[in-house]
Image (spheres, rainbow, N blue to C red):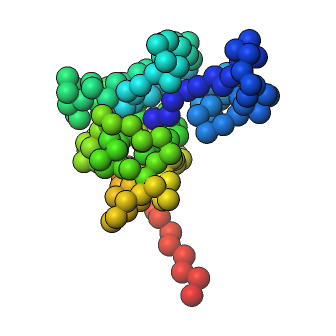
Amino acid sequence: MQQTWPGIKEEDDSYWFSDQSNYNHASVFWNAAREGLLADGSCIHAGLRTRLTGTSFQDYENDVQQGFMQIEVDDIDRWGVEGIAERILTRVGTEVPVYLSIDVDVLDVAFAPGTGTPEAGGWSTRELIRILRGIDGLNVVGADVVEVAPAYDGVGEPTAIAAAQIVYEVVTSMVKRGLEVADSSKVKLVWKDEL
């Protein structure tokens, strides 16, 4: 659920242009797609609600060029949580290995103020948790939660709590799938106690 971003181009005549400007927290998936590291036709950006480049649709065009399916934050009003989860499962399937990256600022700033890029209009924590539970059939092999900035979190640390719950949902989904696969293949799990 990351935004692809191509970095700064030299022709932009930016004061900040450098080779290093193409490598930052927002360019990971853009670079991965450019290097052919992502499976074509199975990538998704969900929870999109802004254009980083002002009046241009460049960010969205970059997503399309790289084969990302886009799910706008407002699509939850049209399709509901179940519809979003269904679209993700349909797009990705349940066998392809999935790396799930969740940017905590997909949540509305009311639920996650402790982020470096707060923005109003995101999903609620409950909506995101329900989406994650709805896609628990994915073959998630790795995941991360990014953009949590404790210095900006408020009283009660709602962002940290939301991020911890997101991690819990993803990890339990991975464990559940692993147990189901082991059970379906009649693989005997051997527990080893080192004590």
Residue 180, position in %: x, y?
A: 37, 51
Q: Can residue 100 be seen in this view?
A: no
Q: Is residue 95 above or below residue 132?
A: above
Residue 84, position in %: x, y?
A: 29, 30
Q: Is residue 100 above or below residue 55?
A: below
The structure residue drawn at horizontal position 46% and vertical position 48%, both measured from the top left corner, is: 115
The image quadrant that residue 83 belongs to is top left
Q: Quadrant of the C terminus?
A: bottom right
Q: Name the side, left or right, on which 79 lies relative to 64.
A: left
The structure residue drawn at horizontal position 32% and vertical position 29%, both measured from the top left corner, is: 73
Can you name the residue that lies furthest to the bottom here? 195
Q: Quadrant of the N terminus?
A: top left
The structure residue drawn at horizontal position 49% and vertical position 12%, both measured from the top left corner, is: 56
Q: Name the side, left or right, on which 135 lies relative to 65.
A: left
Can you name the residue that lies furthest to the right here? 19
Residue 133, position in %: x, y?
A: 29, 46
Q: Is residue 6 visible?
A: yes
The image quadrant that residue 194 belongs to is bottom right
The structure residue drawn at horizontal position 20% and vertical position 23%, both measured from the top left corner, is: 78
Residue 154, position in %: x, y?
A: 37, 59
User: How many labels were placed on the picture?
Assistant: 0
Q: Nearer the viewer, residue 2 or 154?
A: 154
